[in-house]
Image: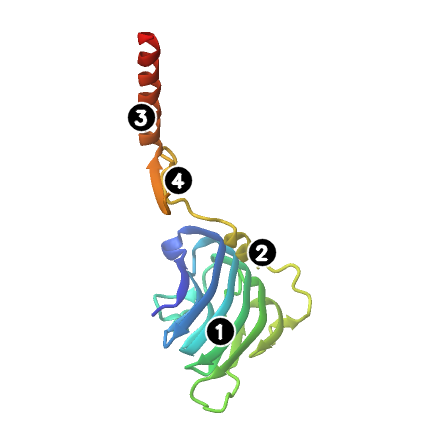
């Protein structure tokens, strides 16, 4: 499984834009990735205002990963030689717990020319699955700016702070209040209760019934 992957973005120099994404309350078991963002070199645009919150990991190979040097799955051999990249910014990882199959629990590989900015880690605790003793996983980062608090593994590229007021986690708060519509706008439904049973009547049927009653009443009045 690829986990929850945003991308890939910017392939063949394309412009891509992704924003206001909320991923929360997910369990990953034995997957290749957990929370992932991947972009190609040479692209343009942005991926921003993204929140991963409440994530449980069980033997996941790449629990947290941003890969701006994505090269069709071969980013280890990719060279940072392009003048443009999809900008990754305002990303929050909060309330992560679990184990990593690899030695790296957090892996940030970003572009030198367009670095990742405003990357936040909060309440993150990732151990290595192979240790059997809760050994802390490692973290690595390249061209990343941001902050972290109560995060294990810690990253030297992220400043330690207790202030996360500028983080994008409000994205998840907004998502909870939005309820999807289950019926088309042009034909809303009416619900009634009758003898303990719920009756659902479409707007078209209800209108036809009212028209019939009105017409019958007019005929009755004319006969009088």
214 vs 52, left or right, is left
Q: Position of residue 25 (x, y in %)?
A: 47, 66
> Mark 2 and mark 1: span between their CA atoms?
24 Å
Q: Quadrant of the N terminus?
A: bottom left
Choose the circle earlier in sequence order: 1 or 4.
1
Q: Quadrant of residue 189?
A: top left
Q: Which mark is residue 170?
A: 2
Disc 1, SS: strand
In three-dimensional space, the C-alpha distance between marks 1 and 4, rounded to whole angstroms, equals 55 Å
Q: Nearer the viewer, residue 81 or 22?
A: 22
Name the residue beneath numbered marker 3. 208
Nearer mark to the viewer, of 3 and 1: 3
Q: Is residue 19 left or right of residue 191?
A: right
| Quadrant of the rendering where the C terminus is positioned | top left
2 or 4: mark nearer the eye: 4
Q: Tell me the tag on residue 107.
A: 1
Rendered image: mark on residue 192: 4
Residue under the point 50% across and 70% down: 108
């Amino acid at each position: 499984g690829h986990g929850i992957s945003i991308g890939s973005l910017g392939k063949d120099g394309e412009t891509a834009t992704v924003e206001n994404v909320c991923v929360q309350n997910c369990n990953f078991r034995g997957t290749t990735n957990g929370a992932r963002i991947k972009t190609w070199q040479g692209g343009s645009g942005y991926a921003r205002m993204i929140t991963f919150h409440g994530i449980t990991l069980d033997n996941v190979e790449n629990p947290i990963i941003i890969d701006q040097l994505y090269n069709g799955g071969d980013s280890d051999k990719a060279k940072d030689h392009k003048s443009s990249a999809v900008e990754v910014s305002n990303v929050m990882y909060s309330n992560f717990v679990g184990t990593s199959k690899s030695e790296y629990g957090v892996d940030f590989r970003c572009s030198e020319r367009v670095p990742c900015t405003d990357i936040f880690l909060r309440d993150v605790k990732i151990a290595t699955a192979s240790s059997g003793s809760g050994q802390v996983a490692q973290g690595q980062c390249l061209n990343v700016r941001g902050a972290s608090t109560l995060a294990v593994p810690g990253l030297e590229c992220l400043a330690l702070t207790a202030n996360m007021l500028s983080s994008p986690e409000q994205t998840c708060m907004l998502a909870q209040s939005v309820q999807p519509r289950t019926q088309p706008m042009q034909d809303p439904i009416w619900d009634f209760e009758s003898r303990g049973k719920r009756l659902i009547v479409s707007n078209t049927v209800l209108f036809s019934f009212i028209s019939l009653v009105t017409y019958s009443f007019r005929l009755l009045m004319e006969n009088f």
